[in-house]
Amino acid sequence: MSFDSAISLHYSAIQMLCEIGAKSDLAEAYHQLALTFCQIGDIEKSRENFELAIQLFGEMQAP
């Protein structure tokens, strides 16, 4: 699977998780997307998605 395909699938999953309100899974999806962007060297998009994941984990008061 290419990185482009992986990113596209992450975005699709994020959209679905937003629609159903699954915060824990949504936070994990943003985390995984951040890791994917990191792998291809897109540090800015990686950081943005890590920040979204951290924000959601914080809202849930996750350890």
Image: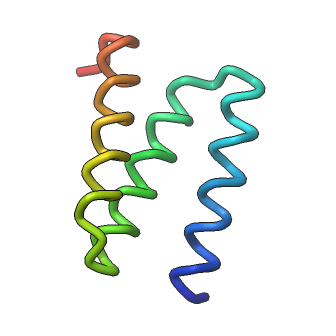
> Residue 58, located in which quarter of the rendered image?
top left
Toward the viewer: 28 or 40? 40
Q: Position of residue 38 (x, y in %)?
A: 28, 69
Relative to 55, residue 37 above or below: below
Residue shown at the point (35%, 57%) measured from the top left: 45
Tell whether 19 sits left or right of 58: right
Q: Position of residue 50 (x, y in %)?
A: 30, 44
Q: Residue furthest bottom?
A: 2
Residue shown at the point (25%, 50%) measured from the top left: 47
Structure colour scheme: rainbow
Relative to 51, residue 20 above or below: above
Q: Position of residue 39 (x, y in %)?
A: 31, 77
Relative to 31, residue 57 above or below: above
Q: Position of residue 18 (x, y in %)?
A: 67, 29
Tell whether 57 sits left or right of 12: left
Relative to 46, residue 53 above or below: above
Q: Residue furthest front?
A: 44
